[in-house]
Image (cartoon, helix red, strand yellow):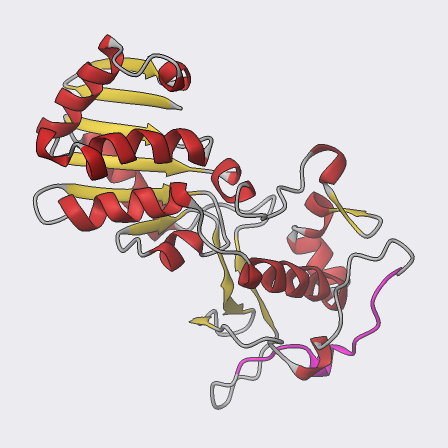
Amino acid sequence: MCITLKTGNLLVSYNFIKIMSVRQSSDIAKFRDTLKSAKNIVFLSGAGISAESGIPTFRGAGGFWRKYQASALATPGAFNNNPSLVWEFYHYRREVAAKCEPNPGHKAIANYEKLYGPEKTITVITQNVDGLHTKAGTKNLIELHGNLYKTRCTKCKEVLTNTDNPICEALANRGAPDVKVVGSDIPVKVLPHCKKPGCGGLLRPHIVWFGESLETEVLNKAGAFNSISSIVSIMTIKFYILSYLFTQFIVISKDMF
C-alpha cells in the first residue's frame, strides 16, 4: 500500500508493504503524525480490495465470461450490437456482487470515516462498481466508473438505482458463465426498459465503458482534490494491510489521534 502525502507542492510517498514485519518503523510514525493532523483524506481503491471479497477482476486468465473477453463486452458497440448478451453479462456480475460482503479493508475505511468524519474531510474515490464500499458504511463516496446497481436510459438519460434481482423477468436464470453457451437471444422488447411515462427507452448499465469518458460531474468532484494544498491519499491494495494499519491506529491506539 502506498501512502502519498501532499503538503503544498511537495509530494512524499511511503511504502507500507513492510509494515507487517516492522511494526514500529519510522514510516509508520510519520504516517501516524501526518494522518493525525490532516484535515483532508482521500482513499483510492481499485479491483484489488474487492477481489478479497470474491469479486472477479476479469484480468489475465480470469478475464473471460463464457468465451468472451470481458473487456469486449464492456463497450457501447457491444451493447448496440447485442444488448441481450451484454445484459446477461451484467446480470451475472450483479448476482455475484450481491452475494459478496465487504471485507476488513472496506470496513476499516468505513470505520475510519465514522470515527473521524466529524473533524476531517474523508473521501473514498473508487474505480469499483460493486457497491461494497457503500455496503460497508462509507458515506462520502465517488464512484468513477459507475455502479452495477444503477441504470441509465438510452433515450431520456435518466439514472436510477435498481437492486431488483433479476432486474427483469427475462434475465431470470440467465448469465451463467458456461463456456458452452454461445450468444444470447433475449428479445430487446423484454430487456430492462425505462418506466418514465412517455419514454420507454432501453436501459443500459450505468457503467463507464471502454471508449467512454468519465461523467463530467464525477470528474469534477474527483479533480477538486488537486486544488487542496494539504491532503493524505491512501491507495488500497490488499485488505489485510489496510485492516492491520487501521486496526493498530484506530481500534487499539485511537488515543494516538
Residue furthest bottom in the image: 197
Q: What residue is rendered at 26% in x and 47% in y?
A: 111
In the visual, does 188 lie left or right of 160? Answer: right
Q: Is residue 220 visible?
A: no
Furthest toward the front, the residue is 252
* x and y percentages locating residue 212 in the rendered image: 55, 47
The residue lying at 35 percent from left, 42 percent from top is 125
Question: Residue at horizontal 61%, vertical 75%?
Answer: 202
Residue 250, image x, y percentages: 20, 37
All told, the count of numbered labels is: 0
Extreme top residue here? 26
The answer to whether residue 175 is above or below residue 187 is above
Q: Position of residue 224 (x, y in %)?
A: 24, 39
Residue at (25, 30) in percent of width and height:
248
Say if 244 sits above or below 4 in the image: below
> Which quadrant is home to the C terminus?
top left
Residue 139 in sight here: yes
Instruction: Tell me: 45 left or right of 246.
Output: right
Along the line of sight, the residue nearer the viewer: 120 or 218: 120
Q: Which residues are magenta?
A: 182-194
Magenta stretch holds residue 9: no
Classify 224 as above or below 188. Answer: above
Residue 133 lies, in percent from the top left, at 39, 51
User: Taking 25 as reference, is 95 left or right?
Assistant: right
Q: Nearer the viewer, residue 95 or 145?
A: 95
176 relative to 252 in the view: left or right = right
Magenta segment: does it hold 183?
Answer: yes
Q: Chief secondary structure of the magenta span?
A: loop
The image quadrant that residue 249 belongs to is top left
Q: Quadrant of the N terminus?
A: top left
